[in-house]
Amino acid sequence: MTTAVGARWVTAAVRPDHPDATVLLREYMTEMVVRYHCRPARPGEVDAALAEMPSDDLAYPGGVLLVAHRGAGLAGCAGLRWQAEFAELTRVFVRPAHRGTGGGAALLAAVEARALAAGAARIRLDTRSDLVEARALYARHGYVEIPAYSQGPYAEHWFEKRLTAGPQGAK
């Protein structure tokens, strides 16, 4: 299923081993490594991070990975993992050349629609303190900070959004 979100953003579900997904997931993880260490990634560091935090479960039946295109360009991704009582948002990434053009909002709208269609009543996520832009994006789109629900090594802030169906879909 392909979803058009906004005037220029289109998302589609792909397997994590799809060529577009592998490019985006590597770029995402490179940025996470660089920002965490405040220095360029060292040889093998991104591969180690990808192995430590694999994305294989972002495929049926455990989850979904959406890739986004803006115009003809590969622009970003976001994933959902299905948990017993919620959908967990992960791997939200917009390529630098596409930032500031509504990509974060488009990806959130697309994953929220997917989660709602799958029967999830809420989305949760955890993130790091240094990802201030991501935390601001989530807050702007109705995600509220909640007590810790996970114990991940990089989890420092936890958010949740309750989903409701309305005349225009997930809100």
Image: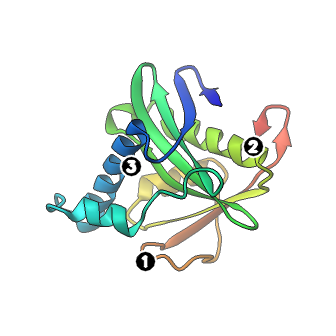
Q: Dot 3, how many residues are within 10 Å of its Cα: few (below 14), some (14-19), or many (20+)?
A: many
Coordinates of residue 27 in the picture (x, y in percent): 32, 47
Q: Earlier in the sequence, mark 2 or mark 3?
A: 3
In the displayed structure, 167 sits above or below 165; it is above
Q: Dot 2, how many residues are within 10 Å of its Cα: few (below 14), some (14-19), or many (20+)?
A: some
Give the residue type that dot 3 points to. Leu
Q: Circle 2 sits on which residue?
A: 171
In the displayed structure, 31 sits above or below 155; it is above
Q: Secondary structure at mark 3?
A: helix
Q: Is residue 134 left or right of residue 27?
A: right
How far apart marks 2 and 1 lie (CA) works out to 30 Å
Disc 2 versus disc 1: nearer the observer = 1
Q: Circle 3 sits on which residue?
A: 25
Residue that protrudes farthest toward the bottom in the picture: 151
Residue 153: assigned label = 1
Give the residue type that dot 2 points to. Lys
Coordinates of residue 52 in the picture (x, y in percent): 37, 69
Give the residue type that dot 1 points to. Pro
Identify the residue at image location x=55%, y=27%.
10
Identify the residue at image location x=63%, y=29%.
3
160 or 92: which is nearer to us? Answer: 92
How far apart marks 2 and 3 lie (CA) works out to 27 Å
Disc 2 versus disc 3: nearer the observer = 3
Coordinates of residue 45 in the picture (x, y in percent): 22, 64
Q: Is residue 100 left or right of residue 61?
A: left
